[in-house]
Amino acid sequence: MTRFVLGLPAFFAMLSCAAAPTPHGALAPSGEGSMGGAPVVSSSSRPTRKEQVRRILPHNVRLSVREDGQARSAASGVVIGNEKTPEGVVSYVLTNAHAVAMDGLDKPSLLVIVDARGDSTEYAARVVATGSVPDMDLALVKVPGLALEPARLATDAEVELGDDVVVAASPFGRALSLSGGMVSQVEWDKDSKLPRMVKTDAPIGYGASGGGIFSLESGKLLAIVEGYRTAKVGFAVAEQNFSFDVPMPGETFAAPSAKVRVFLGQHGFARLLGTEPVASR
C-alpha cells in the first residue's frame, strides 16, 4: 500500500464499494417543413434528460446478502436480460463478484430488491456466474419471478471519452440514488483495441458496487461500477486516533460494455444480449 501525506495522514487504496450493513418537438429550420412561412413542429428522436432518466431507472435494483435475517452486505445491480421458463419469467441481474461473495457466512441468502415510491419487493436470488477478482469482477444473478425490462448494452464503439453519463446505484443499502458526470478516462487494451476499463467523475457512495453507468444520450448501459479510490484520513483527538475514508472525486472505476459482453459469452449467457457466444479476448 502506497502512503501519501496530504496535510493529514492519508492512505490511498482501491476499495470495493460493497457496503457492510416523448420525444419533444423541435422547430423546423426556416424554409424546411413550413407552410406559408410559419414554422412547423417536427418530432425529435432525442428525449429530454428527464425522459431519459425515467427510461433508465426501471433497469436498476439493489442486492442484499443476509445471514440469519441480518444484512451482511449490500450492493447494486442492473437487469441485463430475462427469459420465459416453465416455472415463469426469470430475470438476470449484473453486479460485481466481490459484492455477492458469501465466504465465511453460515447459510447466507441473497435478495434482489425493487423499490417503487416507498414500497419494496424482495425476490430470492442466486448467483449463476462469477468472474475472477480483480481481473473480471462481475457476477450474474438469476431472479425467478422478477419481470423488469433489461437495459440495452452499448456497443464497444459507443464508449467515448467525455460522454455525459448518469450513475444509478443504491449506496449504503438504501433506495436508488443518481449522480451525474462524464466518462473521464478510457483505458484501451493494446491487443483487442477494446476498452478494458472506464472511469467517471460522477460521485458515488459506499455500497454502489454493481451500479450501472448509463449514457444520457442513448440511455444504454456503458459500464458496471467496480469500485472507487478513497483517501483514508487520520487524526488524533484527546490522545485517541480516529480515521475515515473519503471518496476521491473523479476516481470511480467501472467494467465497460466490452468486458460485460466477454463475461456473458464465457459463461454461456450471450443469449441474453441476443448475440452469439463471444470468444475470449
Image (spheres, rainbow, N blue to C red):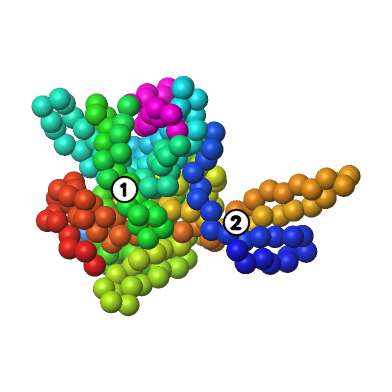
- Location of residue 129 (image quadrant): top left
Where residue 166 appears, as percent x and y from the top left, is 43, 51
Nearer to us of marks 2 and 1 is 1
31 horizontally vs 137: left or right: left
Compared with residue 123, is residue 30 higher up or lower down, i.e. above or below? Answer: below
Check disc 1 and give the amino acid type: Thr
Q: In which quarter of the image is the N terminus?
A: bottom right
Where residue 7 appears, as percent x and y from the top left, is 78, 64
Check disc 2 and give the amino acid type: Thr
Mark number, residue 130 = 1
Compared with residue 115, is residue 46 higher up or lower down, i.e. above or below? Answer: below
Q: Quadrant of the C terminus?
A: bottom left
**Which residue occupies the foreground of this view, 103 or 222?**
103
Which numbered disc flags the more N-terminal residue, 2 or 1?
1
Q: How far apart are marks 2 and 1 (CA)?
A: 25 Å
| Residue extent of the magenta highlight | 105-123
Q: Does the magenta stretch include residue 117?
A: yes
Residue 203 visible in the current orientation? yes
- State the residue at coordinates (79%, 52%): 235
Badge 2: few (under 14), some or many (20 or more) residues near its Cα, within 10 Å? many
Residue 168 visible in the current orientation? no
- State the residue at coordinates (73%, 66%): 5
Mark number, residue 230 = 2
Compared with residue 264, is residue 147 higher up or lower down, i.e. above or below? Answer: above
Q: Is residue 62 magenta?
A: no
177 horizontally vs 195: left or right: right
Q: Furthest residue to the bottom?
A: 190
- Location of residue 29 (image quadrant): bottom left
